[in-house]
Image (cartoon, grey):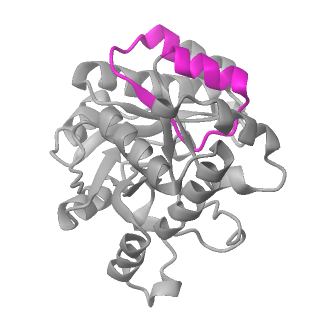
Amino acid sequence: MLVDSHCHLDRLDLAAHGGSLDAALDAARAHGVGHFLCIGVSADNAAAVKGLAEQYADVDCSVGVHPLDLQPGVAPALDWLLAELNHPRVVAIGETGLDYHYEPEAAELQREAFRLHLEAARLTGKPVIVHTREARADTLALLRDAALPQSGVLHCFTEDWEMAKAALDLGFYISLSGIVTFRNAEALREVARQVPVDRLLVETDSPYLAPIPYRGRPNLPQYVREVAEFLAALRGVSLEAFAEQTTTNFQRLFPLAHLKRG
């Protein structure tokens, strides 16, 4: 059984499945995907991701505000975030983090919002899902300052081994997406070879970043199998062993997730 540890089910392009999310999820299940973590990115989609988790037994969700979805000049309210997290299908916080690639001028606001999410993680004990792009030093500094007792994950990891090692030393997991299959991603493949077997997750980040051979098309949760097959071959293990290990890792990181295995 595979888990798509990071997907945006409320944003999928469903044209390949006749506009049906049910059909898209059934296709993923037919590809061996047994669970989905649907990710919150804003106050506007918190209700949507919670609704999907309530609708489907094999879907859980997270709630948070992505650094590129912050309202100009306004960090989310801690009280709002804590209230949203108090839901039985919300198993994680985020995605949150820092993205200086598109909005370097909003760096201070992003740091404020990231600190708020980390405080919510401290108060609730739920793991945090971290987005980081061109913000390596600040991301690691804020994670170190937070010193959370529970773990978290750097999702859709695209950085080098130095950053991966620093995150692993803080107790974090590394999640890899279809980017690892791209022709120009050899540095990322080297990271993928080195991450300890018990700290690795796999994701689609659908509808974004479809793996080879679907690059350039809308991504779908069913394509997590292609990512997993690629990584299993890269690491020299069977798909079955890789799927079992990454699913075990997911359950360890997200203990509140409603997985049904076997």
Q: Is residue 98 above or below residue 54?
A: above
Residue 115 position in % (x across, y down): 45, 21
Q: Is residue 162 magenta?
A: yes
Q: In the image shown, does 24 or 238 lie closer to the viewer?
A: 238
**Residue 131: image x %, image y %?**
55, 37
Q: Quadrant of the N terminus?
A: bottom left
Q: State which quarter of the image contains the C terminus.
A: bottom left
Q: Who's the residue at 37% across and 46% down the image?
A: 247
Vertical relation: 133 (above or below) 178: above
Q: Nearer the viewer, residue 176 or 248?
A: 248
Q: Residue at x 45, y 55 (%)?
A: 240
Nearer the observer, 88 or 163: 163
The part of the image, by quadrant, that contains residue 169 is top right
Range covered by the magenta-colored residues = 143-170
Looking at the image, residue 79 lies above or below residue 24: above
| 170 displayed left or right of 117 | right
Residue 74 visible, this angle: no
Quarter location, residue 236 = top right
108 over 180 or under it: above or below: above
Image location of residue 178, percent across then percent down: 64, 56
Residue at image position (29%, 36%) is 81
Q: Is residue 85 left or right of residue 182?
A: left
Q: Position of residue 10 (x, y in %)?
A: 40, 66
Q: How many marks?
A: 0
Q: Evaluate whether residue 24 shows in this view.
A: yes
